[in-house]
Structures are given as structure tokens and as C-alpha cells.
Image (tube, rainbow, N blue to C red):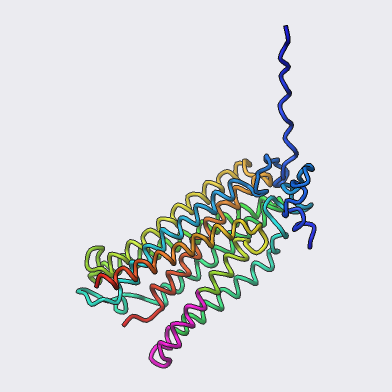
């Protein structure tokens, strides 16, 4: 009786490494996790694109209630934009730190990024409160509805980013985030920078471009 | 043609050899074509971004002095420039494999197309 010889499982070739941690090879030669976050960010472009489109289409139309020119405080929003830009810098410095194995600086920059993000969200809450005080609520007019939905969803993205960064910071303080986990920080950094580039677009299109 | 480009071309796979295309060059992380910028360069990029933002805010206050036909295109160019700098340098699209940039550009093009369709649709309806 012939015996069926079971072939040994194929040996996976040595895959690319990321700070010492070996990953299985992929058909693209790129990390699947990183590809996944880029796909998510591409889909998020559509998400924000829809809200920005709605805002731009409705903001110039005659309507009841306060107009954008009456409620916006450009100096205040400019400071918020500056804070978010600086948080992108601290984020990329955190990534650079973990990639070279400097865990002390990683913790400092991660916490700095989360704090700067918190300052931004606090500013947004203050802005919304001011708008409400001036008589601009979510359902006052089409401008306010589209404005609050767009900036509110952006604020929600920043808040999720802060929670993500604080989780990484906790892992780093417990010694559970090492140089081998640099990709985890890189994925969070990509999300954070995306939130920043969306704000770059919102800041110009929503706040700075003059409204007739 | 660099060594990296040769490895990316898949020529070795076509020849039936053991692929080395999936392994990054020494000193590089998976998905990288070139090393990421240094921290000093990151700070310099931040200075450029802040300078462009300051220019944008200054343009806002020139409303009335300068025509909107000048201000709006300048603001849009500044916005695109800042977007591009963050995507290229901080998100490393400049130094990573082009597949990531392709995904991102796909999303941006889809968003702009969506805006165009909605705009044309509303114009037709009104």
C-alpha cells in the first residue's frame, strides 16, 4: 500500500523587517497594515469631500441667521491651525524617535502631540460655544448645518487620534512599545497627518476664502 | 536605473528566481525607497508650513485691498502647497513606494469628482 508522503510546509522566505520584527512578505513588497491605512485614508477623502462640497455649495446662498463673516474669528482659528500644524511636527518626531530606538523622546513627542490635539479640540469646543451664543445653532440655516457637520466630524477625527496617541503613550510608558513596533506609531502618524491635511483644506476653503 | 528600481521591476520574479523584491535595501524599512528625512529637516519643513500659513492669513486681511480674483487663487495655491508638503514629507509619500501615493491620489480624485458631480447636478436642477 502506497503511503502518501506529506510535503513539508513551504518555508517562507525571510521577509522584510521593521526594526527587528520580521513580517511575512507581501505581493506588493509593502506592509499590508500600511496599505490598509492608506486605503482607509483614501475613503476618508471621499467622506470629507462630501461634507466640504455640501458646505461650499450652500454657504453663499441667502439665508436667515448670522453669516460666516459675522461669526468667524480668524485670529483664533489661525492659532488653532498653527497648533495642529505643530502637532504634525511632534508626531513625525515621535516616529523618528521610535525608528532610531529612542523611547524616551518617543514618549515625550507622543504626549506633546496628544496635548496639542487636545488644545485644538478645546478651541473648537470654545468656537462652537461662541457661535451658539451668537445665535448660530446646528439647524439655524444651511450654512450652520454644513459648517457644524464638517468641522464637528473633523473634531471627532482629532479626538479619536488623541485617544489613539494616548494609548500608544501608555504602551510606551509600560515598555510594551519598542523599536520593533515602529510601524504601529507610523500608522497612527499617517492618520494624524491626514487629520492635519484635512484641516489645511478646511481652514482655507471654509475660513479664509471670502464669502459674498 | 537604481538597484531599488531593478528590484521593484519584478524582473527577477519573471525569471523564476527567488524574489528579493520584497526585501528592503539595508537600512530601509518595508515600503521605503529612500530613508525618511532627519528630525532637523522635519523642523525646517514645519517652519515653511508656518510661513505659508502666515502668508495665507495675511492674504485674508488684504481683502478689499486686493481683488478676490487675486486672493482666491493665491489661497488655493497656498493650500495645495501645504497639503503637498505634509503628504510628501510628513506622510513620507516622497520616500515610500508609489503604491501608497496612488491610493491617496485615487481618494483625492474621487472626492474632487464627487464635488464636480454634485455641483453640476445642482446647477442642472436649479
Single out the residue that lies furthest toward the bottom. Answer: B65
- A119 or A185, which lies in front? A185
Q: Where is residue A125? Give x, y as percent.
A: 36, 62
Q: Where is residue A83? Give x, y as percent.
A: 50, 67
Q: Residue at x 50, y 71 (%)?
A: A82
Q: Where is residue B77? Give x, y as percent.
A: 51, 78
Single out the residue that lies furthest toward the top. Answer: A1
Q: Is residue A6 one of those drawn in magenta? A: no
* Residue A34 relative to residue A23: left or right: left
The residues colored magenta run B60-79
Q: Is residue B67 one of those drawn in magenta? A: yes
Q: Residue at x 63, y 42 (%)?
A: A175
The image quarter containing residue B63 is bottom left
Above or below: residue B91 compared with residue A103 = below
Above or below: residue A10 compared with residue A78 = above
Above or below: residue A7 compared with residue A107 = above
* Residue A94 relative to residue B74: left or right: right
- B44 or B125, which lies in front? B125
The image quarter containing residue A153 is bottom left
* Residue B87 relative to residue A129: left or right: right
Magenta: main secondary structure: helix
Q: Where is residue A21? Give x, y as percent.
A: 70, 41
Q: Residue at x 57, y 69 (%)?
A: B84
* Residue A70 relative to residue A184: left or right: left
Amino acid at each position: 500500500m502506497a503511503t502518501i508522503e506529506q510535503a513539508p510546509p513551504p518555508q517562507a522566505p525571510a521577509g522584510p523587517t521593521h526594526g527587528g520584527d520580521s513580517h511575512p512578505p507581501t505581493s506588493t513588497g509593502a506592509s499590508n497594515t500600511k496599505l490598509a491605512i492608506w486605503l482607509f485614508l483614501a475613503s476618508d477623502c471621499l467622506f470629507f469631500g462630501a461634507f466640504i462640497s455640501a458646505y461650499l455649495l450652500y454657504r453663499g446662498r441667502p439665508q436667515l441667521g448670522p453669516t460666516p463673516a459675522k461669526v468667524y474669528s480668524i485670529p483664533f482659528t489661525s492659532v488653532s491651525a498653527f497648533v495642529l500644524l505643530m502637532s504634525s511636527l511632534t508626531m513625525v518626531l515621535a516616529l523618528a524617535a521610535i525608528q532610531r530606538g529612542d523611547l524616551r523622546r518617543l514618549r515625550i513627542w507622543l504626549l506633546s502631540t496628544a496635548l496639542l490635539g487636545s488644545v485644538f479640540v478645546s478651541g473648537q469646543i470654545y468656537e462652537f460655544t461662541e457661535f451658539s451664543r451668537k445665535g448660530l445653532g446646528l439647524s439655524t440655516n444651511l450654512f450652520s448645518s454644513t459648517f457644524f457637520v464638517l468641522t464637528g466630524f473633523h473634531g471627532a477625527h482629532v479626538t479619536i487620534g488623541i485617544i489613539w496617541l494616548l494609548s500608544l503613550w501608555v504602551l510606551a510608558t509600560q515598555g510594551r512599545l519598542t523599536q520593533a513596533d515602529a510601524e504601529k506609531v507610523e500608522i497612527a502618524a499617517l492618520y494624524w497627518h491626514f487629520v492635519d491635511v484635512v484641516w489645511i483644506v478646511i481652514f482655507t476653503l471654509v475660513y479664509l476664502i471670502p464669502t459674498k | 536605473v537604481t538597484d531599488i528600481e531593478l528590484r521593484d521591476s519584478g524582473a527577477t520574479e519573471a525569471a523564476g528566481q527567488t524574489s528579493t523584491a520584497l526585501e528592503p535595501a539595508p537600512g530601509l524599512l518595508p515600503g521605503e525607497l529612500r530613508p525618511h528625512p532627519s528630525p532637523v529637516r522635519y523642523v525646517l519643513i514645519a517652519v515653511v508650513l508656518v510661513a505659508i500659513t502666515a502668508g495665507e492669513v495675511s492674504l485674508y486681511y488684504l481683502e478689499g485691498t486686493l481683488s478676490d480674483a487675486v486672493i482666491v487663487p493665491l489661497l488655493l495655491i497656498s493650500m495645495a502647497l501645504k497639503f503637498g508638503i505634509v503628504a510628501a514629507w510628513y506622510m513620507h509619500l516622497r520616500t515610500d513606494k508609489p503604491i501608497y501615493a496612488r491610493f491617496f491620489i485615487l481618494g483625492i480624485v474621487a472626492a474632487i469628482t464627487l464635488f464636480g458631480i454634485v455641483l453640476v447636478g445642482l446647477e442642472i436642477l436649479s
